[in-house]
Image (cartoon, helix red, strand yellow):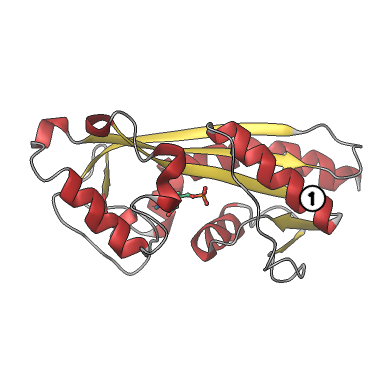
Amino acid sequence: MKILIGTANPGKLREYRELLADIPATFVSTADAGLASLEVDESADTFTGNALIKARAYAQASGLLTLADDSGLAVDALDGAPGVHSARYGGNGLDDRGRRQRLLAALADVPEGQRTARFVCVIALVDPSGEHNETLTEGTVEGRIAFEDREGPVGFGYDAVFIPEGYEESFAQLPGSVKHEMSHRGRAARQMVPVLQRIVGAD
Ligand code: IMP
């Protein structure tokens, strides 16, 4: 059985392939499905709303069971920003590093104890045939924003500025398996595993 991972983000795609490695299905990318140029307007103002918009759009376009997430970073000192706008923070001209620099600049005067933040991930699973109900799962991870970019061998997006609670290293510096254990995406994905197993098992 083929399952589409509905994302244009290579970092997310890699993480889902790792997180769902035990599911006996073939996980295809939007490029594999010929949908690399499909643009989906993430017009909702919640992670749940945008996850559903993406999963429904990719499911309809591909005809495949589709999993898509909407995720982002909520920083307390910025009243929850960038939140659902994490991918576009600072405008369309910035890359991941530029967005991290923008965030570090916005928090330049914020002291250690007030740099708390969390990553949020909502996954939507949509079956275009309607045979299986839409399913939503959610995961969060608490942490704080570093004072500088802390890049490592892996990681994408805001990983290099996010230090999970109980650690001194950023998500980019920690091994992928450690990130998965506690990350927003790992938590949401593990709740989705039994649902996927049921669907794949019945196929
Ligand atoms: P989306 O594709 O609209 O869900 O955008 C997600 C945004 O949040 C992107 O800017 C990502 O880089 C960022 N993001 C989501 N999850 C992570 C993560 O696990 N690590 C780092 N950045 C993330």
Q: Is residue 44 visible?
A: yes
In screen coordinates, is 89 left or right of 195?
left
Residue pictured at 35% horizontal, 63% vertical = 94
Q: Disc 1 beta carbon < 8 A from ligand 1?
A: no
- Which one is in front, 17 or 110? 110
Whether residue 133 is situated above or below residue 126 in the rendered picture: above
Q: Could you say which quadrant of the image residue 109 lies in?
A: top left
Q: Is residue 172 visible?
A: no
Q: How many marks?
A: 1
Residue pointed to by mark 1:
59
Q: Position of residue 146 (x, y in %)?
A: 18, 48
Whether residue 60 is situated above or below residue 82 in the rendered picture: below
Give the structural element (helix, strand or loop) at label 1.
Answer: helix
Residue pictured at 24% horizontal, 38% vertical = 166
Q: Position of residue 91 (x, y in %)?
A: 38, 55
Q: Could you say which quadrant of the image residue 95 lies in?
A: bottom left
On-image quarter of the N terminus: bottom right
In screen coordinates, is 104 left or right of 188?
left
Q: Position of residue 183 (x, y in %)?
A: 43, 43
In screen coordinates, is 99 left or right of 202?
left
Which three-letter amino acid code belongs to the residue tagged 1?
A: Ala
